[in-house]
Image: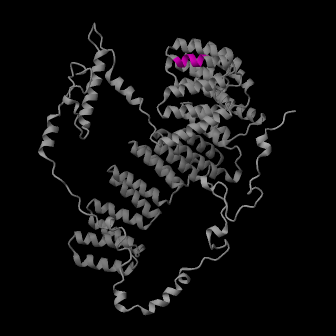
Amino acid sequence: MTTPPAALVNRNKKHFLGVPAPLGYVAGVGRGATGFTTRSDIGPARDANDVSPKIQQQFSDLKRDLVTVSEDEWRNVPEVGDARNRKQRNPRAEKFTPLPDSVLSRNLGGESSSSIDPTSGLASMMPGVATPGMLTPTGDMDLRKIGQARNTLMNVKLSQVSDSVTGQTVVDPKGYLTDLQSMIPTYGGDINDIKKARLLLKSVRETNPNHPPAWIASARLEEVTGKIQAARNLIMKGCETNPQSEDLWLEAARLQPPDTAKAVIAQAARHIPTSVRIWIKAADLESETKAKRRVYRKALEHIPNSVRLWKAAVELENPDDARILLSRAVECCSTAVELWLALAKLETYENARKVLNKARENIPTDKSIWTTAAKLEEAHGNHQMVERIIERALTSLNSNGVEINREHWFKEAIESEKGGHIHCCRAIIKAIIGYGVESEDQKHTWMEDAENCVTQGAYECARAVYNHALTTFPSKKSIWLRAAYLEKNHGTRESLESLLQRAVAHCPQSEVLWLMGAKSKWLAGDVPAARGILALAFQANPNSEEIWLAAVKLESENNEYERARRLLAKARGSAPTPRVMMKSAKLEWALNDLDAALKLLDEGLQVFPDFPKLWMMVGQIYEQKADLSKAFDAYNNGVSRGKES
C-alpha cells in the first residue's frame, strides 16, 4: 500500500476555512459572477398585491404649490409637444445642387448603343463588351425595346427550324405561340395558399395513401399552377398505390398526351377489366372506327351484361351487323328495354312481333313494350289490334302490380301523336280516360284533359277526349260547343260540319250550334245548304229571334232582298221583337225606301215605345229628309220615353 506525498500531509490549514462568509459576499464576483438578488438589493419595492397610486395622488404635494403661480407665469407656460417631432412637422425644403458640366460630358461620352440585326442572329458573342470602358449607363428600362428584342429572338428561333430543302417552316408559329400561352399558369391566387395546399395534400397522401381523391386533388393543384409534369408524376404514383381505382386511372389518362394516354388506359384495363368507364375511355381515345369496334368487343368479353357497352357498340355497326349484335345483347341483358326495342325496329314485321312478345315475357312491367307493339300493328294497317293491345297492356300491367298513372299514359299518347301514330294515341286515350275518375268529376276532369292536350298541340288527343265525353254526356251543349270550337280552330270544315250535324241531332234547341252550321256552309259558298240548315233550325226553334235574323242576314248578304223582306214579315208575325222591327226598318232604309222605313218604325214604336234605337232611327231619317222639326220631336220623345238611354 502506497503512502501519500509528504507535501499533502504536512500542508498547513488555511485560516478562513470553516469560517462563515462575510455579509454580501458573492463567490466569483471578481470574474463577473452574480449572486441572488435580494430585496435589499432592489430597494424599497411594492408587493404584487399593492394598489398602484393614481397620478393625482402622486402629484398632490405639487398641486398645492400651484396656488403661488402668477398670471404672467401661466401665460409663459410653453405648449405641450411644441419641441417634440419638430423636424417631422416642419421639414426643411429639399436642396438641389447643380452638377458640374464635366461630370455630364464624361457620362455622355461613355454611352454606346447596340442593336440586334434581325438577319444575323445575335450581334455579339459576348453582350456588353462593345461598351467602351465598360461604362454601362444606368437609366429607366425601355419596355418597348425589350419587346422588340423578344420578338426578334423568337423569329430567329423559328427561322432556324425551317426545312432546308423546301424552305417551308416545319413549325407553325401561331401554334407555337399558342402552346407557350397554354403553359402559363392560370392560377391567380396567393402563392402562400398554394404552398399550404401542397403541404396539406402531402400530409393526406402520407397519412392515407389509399385515398384516391387526395392523389387526384394533388395532381389537379399542380395542373392549375402550370406544373403539368409534376401532376403526371403524382397521378401515376397514385395509380401505383391504388391500382383498383378507376377515377385515378381516368384522371391519369386525361393528364397524359394522347399516345401515352392509350398506354395508361391499357394498363388500367389490365388492373380493372370490369370497369365500364375505362373501356369507354379507351374507345374514345381511338380515332378509327375499326379500332373502336375492337375495343368494345374486347370490353364485352369481360363485361357482357353492360347495357352501356352494348349500346355504344351497336351505334358503330351497320344495320345488318347491329341486328346480329342486338340479338346477342338481349340474351346477355334480357331486362334492358332499350335493346329489345332497338332490335324490334331492325327486324321484319313478323320477327319484330316475336321479339316484342319475348320482351313482354322477360319484362312484364314495362309499358313501352306494349305501346311499341301497338305502333307496329298500326304501321302495318292492323288498326283493330291497336285497341286490343292497349287494353291488354293495362290489364297485364295492373295484374303485375304496376301503378297505372293517367299523366304518364297521357304523355305516352301525346308522344304517339307527335310520332304520327294517331290510332295508337286514340286507343290510349280511350283506355285510360276513365281510369281512376269518379263519376261526379268526369266532366270537369275530362275538360281539363282536353285543354291540356290542346295546350301541348296534341289536337288528336283532345278530339279523342271530346269524343269519349260526348259518348258519355251526349246532351251536354257545352261539350259540343268546346268540340266545335276545336274543329273550327284546328280542324277542317268537313270535320266541323260533321260534328255540328251530330250536335244538333242531340241538342236541337241550341241556336248557336245551328247558326255555326249555317255559317260554315255560307262561308264555303254553299248558300242553299245554309238555307236548308236554317229551315231545319226554324222547325226546331220556330220563335227564335237569332235564327230569324241569321236567315235575314244570309239573304241580305247574297242580295236577295225580297227573300229578306218576306222573312222579316214572317218574323214580325211570329216573333215580333224590338230587334226584328229595327232590322225590318233598317233594311228598307238601306234600300232607300224612307217612307216604308218610317211606317215600320211607327208600328214598332206602338208596340215597343221604350226602345230608344227606334226613336233614334226616326230622327235620323227625318234629318236625312231635311225635316229638322220632326227629327227634334223624335229625339225629345225618345229622351222622355227612355230616360236611362
**Horizontal side of residue 165 vs 30, given as left or right:** left
Q: Quadrant of residue 548?
A: bottom left
Q: Residue at horizontal 57%, vertical 46%?
A: 450
The relative height of residue 135 versus residue 327 in the rendered view (above or below) is below
**Horizontal side of residue 639 vs 434, given as left or right:** left
Most prominent secondary structure in the magenta stretch? helix
The quarter of the rendered structure image containing the C terminus is bottom left
Q: Residue at horizontal 49%, vertical 87%?
A: 63
Q: Which residues are magenta?
A: 260-266
Q: Quadrant of residue 615?
A: bottom left
Residue 357 point in image, percent of width and height? 71, 22
The quarter of the rendered structure image containing the N terminus is top right
Foreground residue, 615 or 133?
133
Q: Residue at horizontal 45%, vertical 92%?
A: 67
Foreground residue, 540 or 632?
632
Residue 167 point in image, percent of width and height? 26, 11
